[in-house]
Amino acid sequence: MDLGFLEDVPVFCYVVRREGDDFVLEHLNPAARERSPALTAFIGHPLTELYSDQPDVRMAALRCIEEQRVVEHELCFRKHNLTEATERLKLRYVPAPPDLVLIYVTELKRPDMIQSALDETESRYQSLVASLPDAVMLRGVDGRVLFCNEMALELFGAQGLADVLGKRDVLAPEVTVHDEAGRAIGTADVPSLRVISTGRPERGQVYSFARAGTVRWLRVAAQPIRSGEGHVTGSVTTFTDVTERVEAQAALRESAKRLELALTSARMGVWEYELATDRGWWSPNLYEIFRFARGGVGLASFLDHVHPDDRSDILDKLASMRTGYHGQTYQSEYRIVGEDGVTRWARMYGRIFIKGLQRMVAGTTMDITEQRQLEEQLHLASRLESIGRLAGGVAHDFNNLLTAMLGSLDLVDGHVDPSAAEDLATIRHSVLRARDLTRQLLAFARKQPVVWRTVDLKVLVSDVRLLLQRLVGPRVTLSLTIVGDPLVSADATLLEQVLVNLVVNARDAMPEGGRLDIHLEQLPGDPVTAPYGTARLCVSDSGVGMDEATRTRVFEPFFSTKSLGTGLGLASSYGIIHQLGGDIRVESELKRGTRFIVTLPCVAPGQRPQRQSQPAAPAVSAHGTVLVVDDEEAVRSTTARLLRLLGYEVLEASNGASAVAVSSGHPGRIDLLLCDMAMPGEDGRAVAAELKERRPELEVVLMSGYSADGQSTSPNGALFLQKPFNRVDLAQRLAEALHRR
């Protein structure tokens, strides 16, 4: 049949040819190609594929050709960038013997208001997806692409949306995809298509996308889209670039292999064991590694050295070996107790060798005690890091509350009945105690203010010896040993706090008295990380010691075995040492005492640090205008009242935008800016810099519940006020700022 007359038909029309119980798309007229360019890709494809979610389309075509009459049918239709039906189409089927059907498509218009709202929703949705940093792709129920953002187009190697819309396979020929095991991913393995058929979301799988020699790793998360009735209508897939993490993990794994090889070479031995005769052989170095008494190495002798809790695992392995096949391998980790009473971890690799009736097991055993300890330390450091972030956030928010409390106490001071003076003193004492606790939390979170100076540890430890002797009391013998003269870059006050905390902890571990040894020495350091050596400070006691469960939690805040302890002394010491770039660890056993080991990198030897006295700021009369910027209303209001009480004129703002507006609207001079460093979505330093640019005469004082970290990047070296503060702290800091001008 000549279909040329369809070329001039202005109505959307296409022709299908019957093949069995289905139809194949044969032809599209210009109106159809213009309205739906993606349909051209389906020429030659079955009608059931084109309308996989509309089986009535094929049934209507069958009625038309079998009954040789015109059939009309209506169906819901969705646009490429939507997942729900948004239009209604009228399909008119006209038979064209012997096996063709002409289908004319007419769009049933929707009300203008609904279409306008739909267009607006589509625009917002597309803008949102386009702004995402991840690649995003939307498929329909038939797997065809309905929409994707620019990041996805770049990932797929497409030049524009037209390259992927309406297609199931979206990758350019030069793009290849593999999973983490290196297996090539075909169309059947694509998560975005798989979730449409299974209806189950898939998250967390990582794939490599290679193009032009460049490999990117992406985590793919595919989620099925469901209609209001719960039917799957498509899928949405996000691709998150995790290249840096994957490469870092690969580098870490490679580094771990090299480390394991080095440890194996130094701390490994070989062995053989004949199951039937219970006879074995150990390489001589295994006796030295695990401190075995030389003698028989039969099963009974060996089990005598295995920790009782691990013997059942060894016996289960041996039972399996008696029935295992040639070449079968085994691996096990267990503890060995040496003749010296020390427990060491061993890793055993074994392989079965069968020759005739003889069944042998041979393998290697290596000491992994150090590796186990490193794993425990890594786990502990990771856990403490998470707790530290929480502690720092709690301390910051609590400091805001304490600032309002201290300020309010200053405001009511002298204005209450004398009978309430004692109650006010109790409140003030409690607030100050709470301030001290938050400072210890900040120290644990590594957000404590640091005054960096070159510190002579020999002088520092010697100067506090008398104080430490008073702390431990007469029943504890204090011994101090210093080897070398290590210099470190640190905060002397914070180091003294750490030393006092460790000594107090040791004293409490010896209620009946004992011996406390403080040993300071300078050791050679790593040429890269510590070219001038390492300072090591050891505080050892002969106290009750700790079990393993206590030792692993000793640096956690609020964890204490003392009935009256706060659990912050060792936690703050941990934070301080790590903030200073060092490390602190603990070794302890029950009834064998405890030793804390602090290490810090040394600095180059040079001029000895001089004791410095901090000059007091000159007294300046309180006058001028202060702009207070703080998002906490209680802090801002209380601070403003204190400033007015001191004699200042006060302007208030709750955020950066408000501060700029207040500054612009104030006709007079603004002398001081008192601005919080951390406000929701804003950096106080940036706010101060903008106001300083508008008003060059402005002096800036930044305040925070965290610390003074980052002052070096403050505009023109702004001063810092630590929260919580009282009226005296506030007056002195503002006076210092005015004096600088």
Image (spheres, helix red, strand yellow):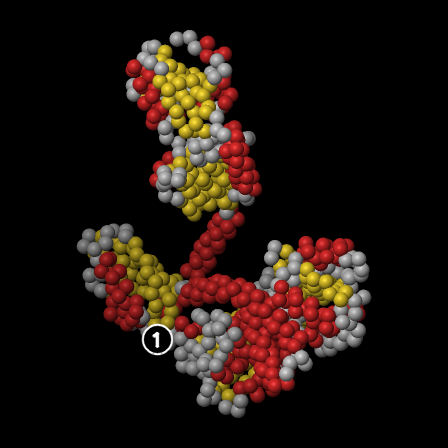
Quarter of the rendering containing residue 489: bottom right
Closer to us: 426 or 169: 426
Q: Residue at x 37, y 20 (%)?
A: 72
Residue 239, how many percent across, how many down? 48, 42
- Amino acid residing under circle 1: Glu
Is residue 473 visible to us here?
yes
| Quarter of the C terminus within the rendering | bottom right
- Horizontal relation, residue 89 to residue 66: left or right: right
- Horizontal relation, residue 237 to residue 332: left or right: right
In this view, which residue lies farthest toward the bottom? 474
Q: Secondary structure at mark 1?
A: loop
In this view, which residue lies farthest toward the left? 357
Closer to us: 89 or 22: 89
Is residue 183 visible to us here?
no
Q: Residue at x 47, y 17 (%)?
A: 11
Residue 162, how many percent across, how many down? 52, 28
Q: Which residue is mark 1?
A: 339
Q: Residue at x 25, y 51 (%)?
A: 326
